[in-house]
Amino acid sequence: MDKLYQFVDIPNLERVQQELLNSIQHDYKLHDRPHAFTYNLEYVAKTCPTLMQWLIPKCKLPLRLLRYYVTPPRQNLGIHIDGGYNSPTVPFGLNIPVIGVKDTYQIFYKCDSDNMYGNTPDGYNQSLHPKDVSKLVPIDKVEITTPCFTNNSVMHNVENNTDEYRIMFVIRWYLHQTKAREIEEVINLS
């Protein structure tokens, strides 16, 4: 993906958002720091039929990940690149806002390769992080209030400076070093 982000229209978005919110099986407000949780395709298809009836016929490749990201009030998701030294970077993800997204931002940064290190934090997939945050240069930011593909192979984070919990549902596809690196290779948006 060459762009940093690309918005996409999903029909019946309010219904999709309500189904996504209702499918969460735990009290996400019990956590006082950013966290994520994943559900399998069978569960999401059953609990979020409006989204899946739109998504599945459009997919050209299998779905790899269906995950919720929760950022509590006045919290930030750490600066990172999805993927790392021993695994391909994740070229993009489809982000569907669920609740609490107004006035929150995904920020993209320029980060030189000599200012990165890799790790696997708290059971998540491998990721790259800046060694020195003061050397980062913000290049753009986006408020994701409608569905949006974001470039996850560029250093980024999420800032939630509101009093609300921010929940984003993320969809990811097949991961390979050279294949499925562009949106059109995994989903038909026409």
Image: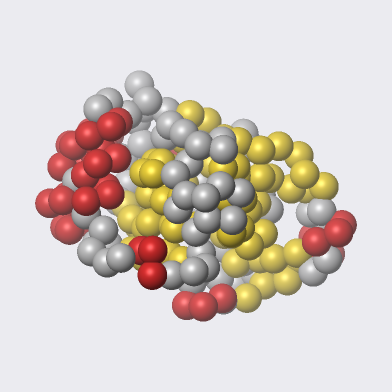
* In front of the other: 187 or 31: 31
Residue 178 % position (x, y): 54, 51
Relative placement, left or right, of 74 versus 41 is: right
Q: Residue at x 69, y 66 (%)?
A: 129
Q: How many marks?
A: 0
Residue appearing at x 16%, y 51% in the figure = 47
Which of 72 and 173 lies nearest the eye of the viewer?
72
Q: Residue furthest left?
A: 46
Furthest residue toward top: 190
Q: Quadrant of the C terminus?
A: top left
Q: Is residue 49 left or right of residue 21?
A: left
Which x, y percent locates residue 23?
22, 54
Q: Determine the residue positioned at 47% across, 49% down.
A: 164
Comparing 52 with 32, the one in front is 32
Quick check: 99 left or right of 120? left
Q: Position of residue 98 (x, y in %)?
A: 36, 44
Residue 133 at least partly seen? yes
Q: Is residue 157 above or below residue 60?
A: below
Which is more toward the observer, 40 or 33?
33
What is the image's colouring?
Answer: secondary structure
The answer to whether residue 179 is visible is no
Q: Residue at x 51, y 46 (%)?
A: 92
Quadrant (top left, top right, bottom left, bottom right) of the N terminus: top right
Provide residue 84's location: percent of width, then percent of height. Answer: 62, 66
Residue farthest toward the front in the current orientation of the protein: 163
Q: In the rendered view, would you say 153 is above or below 85?
A: above
